[in-house]
Image (cartoon, rainbow, N blue to C red):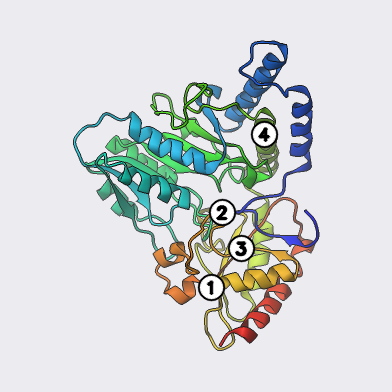
């Protein structure tokens, strides 16, 4: 990982040694195109399907329900645009329902649906101060003309874990397909896809110590999608392009490591105890407060590896989160402010604005996200580093 302390797992995570070893072995042995019919191609095809079978087993579904993509953003686009294109035209307008705290990829796919001039509109379900869905409003919005719902399961900026089982039950009762962005949840809690009231589920390898450049989309039986990338008809005709066999093997290895950790800890992510200790330490700093759900009161409503903070100076003024991130980086601590996948020019977080924070506070967010490479001793210096960063930023603020 290089020098310093890395606390930005929600942006990406350092690949595990076991993942790198699995990828190197597969790259050396199964390097060929898995669509080729000769010996080397068949070796690659067999490896690809073994990885698909392993991933299906780990996520509680059949291997034929697993479609590989280039990452979470592509999976989200395939889910939304592909599901919409596969639907009969029906009466216009047609409506997509999303939450107020979605990932930028979901927002981009929703905009694309609207721009395609096929009668699609978008409705937004509000969230409370902790970033949790208003289920009553979701139920109201499931009336016609809603044809599709997409919800983020684990919110990357404020850590809120949405009640997907309850939301999915509402969607099933209304007969509306549900896509779930599980990018931040994958690897941090057990997932049995076929037991969830969910029709489509997106994930990415690099959030759980797997490689960048590979993601997945899980499909419930009977779900129809129109492919969004044409060509050779790979992935059951749903996603053309030569599959990256070593990356898929790395994804399977990362999921296996995560599953082993969860099983050893009785089904919960052991990183939560480290996170809770860090939370107590940083909240003791003046001017630092928690945003999103409080894991001390509602542990299942927050991602187990996630902390999001709002930071004020001694005079009570919100301090710019991006400035804090830069100062922390100079002190050897990697953290983030807002979504690493957002290119918005505004310093205020759209997610914090949706939670009801005023603009200055919505620009003061600081996110710390942990992973299994960390131990309690590694985190001992974090409060002091944050305090130093606050002093530096405060000295430059008017």
Between 62 and 9, the residue placed more toward the observer is: 9
- Residue drawn at the location 66% of the way across and 70% of the way down: 326
Mark carried by residue 247: 4
Q: Earlier in the sequence, mark 1 or mark 3?
A: 3
Instruction: For marks 1 and 3, give the CA distance.
Output: 11 Å
Q: Residue 50, relative to residue 260: is it above or below?
A: above
Question: Which one is closest to the eye, mark 1 or mark 4?
Answer: 4
Pick whichever, 207 or 392, lies toward us.
392
Residue at mark 2: 303
In the image, 118: left or right of 249?
left
- The residue identified by callout 3 is 336
Q: Looking at the image, which residue sits at the far left?
A: 91
Residue 118 spot, x, y in % from top left: 26, 39
User: Crowdedness of circle 4 by 10 Å Cα count: few (<14), some, many (20+)?
Assistant: many
Instruction: First in sequence, mark 3 or 4: give its number.
Output: 4
Residue sitting nearer the eye, 7 or 106? 106
> Can you identify the residue that label 1 sits on?
364
């Amino acid at each position: 990982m290089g020098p310093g302390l890395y606390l930005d797992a929600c942006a990406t995570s350092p690949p595990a040694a076991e993942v790198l070893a699995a990828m190197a072995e597969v790259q050396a042995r199964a390097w060929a195109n898995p669509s080729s019919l000769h010996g080397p191609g068949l070796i690659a095809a067999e490896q690809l399907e073994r990885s698909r079978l392993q991933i299906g087993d780990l996520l509680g579904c059949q291997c034929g329900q697993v479609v590989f993509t280039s990452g979470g953003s592509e999976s989200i686009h395939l889910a939304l645009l592909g599901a919409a294109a596969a639907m009969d035209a029906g009466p216009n307008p047609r409506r997509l329902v999303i939450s107020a705290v979605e990932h930028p990829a979901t927002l981009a796919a929703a905009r694309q649906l609207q721009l395609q001039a096929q009668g699609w509109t978008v409705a937004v379900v509000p969230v409370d101060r902790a970033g949790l869905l208003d289920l009553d409003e979701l139920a109201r919005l499931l009336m016609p003309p809603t044809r599709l719902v997409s919800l983020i399961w684990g919110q990357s900026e404020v850590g809120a874990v949405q009640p997907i089982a309850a939301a999915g039950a509402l969607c099933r009762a209304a007969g509306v397909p549900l896509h779930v962005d599980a990018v931040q949840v994958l690897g941090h809690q057990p997932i049995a896809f076929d037991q969830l009231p969910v029709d489509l589920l997106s994930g990415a390898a690099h959030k759980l110590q797997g490689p960048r450049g590979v993601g997945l989309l899980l499909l419930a039986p009977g779900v129809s999608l129109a492919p969004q990338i044409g060509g050779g008809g790979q992935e059951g005709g749903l996603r053309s392009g030569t599959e990256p066999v070593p990356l898929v093997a790395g994804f399977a290895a990362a999921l296996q490591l995560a599953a082993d950790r969860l099983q050893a800890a009785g089904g919960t992510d052991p990183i939560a105890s480290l996170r809770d200790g860090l939370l107590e330490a940083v909240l003791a700093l003046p001017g630092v407060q928690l945003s999103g759900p409080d894991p001390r009161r509602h542990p299942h409503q927050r991602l187990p590896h996630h902390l999001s903070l709002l930071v004020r100076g001694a005079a009570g003024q919100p301090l710019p989160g991006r400035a804090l991130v830069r100062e922390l980086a100079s002190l050897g601590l990697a953290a983030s402010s807002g979504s690493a996948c957002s290119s918005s020019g505004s310093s205020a977080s759209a997610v914090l604005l949706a939670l009801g924070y005023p603009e200055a506070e919505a620009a003061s967010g600081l996110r710390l996200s942990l992973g299994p490479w960390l131990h309690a001793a590694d985190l001992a210096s974090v409060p002091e580093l944050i305090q130093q960063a606050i002093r530096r930023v405060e000295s430059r603020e008017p």
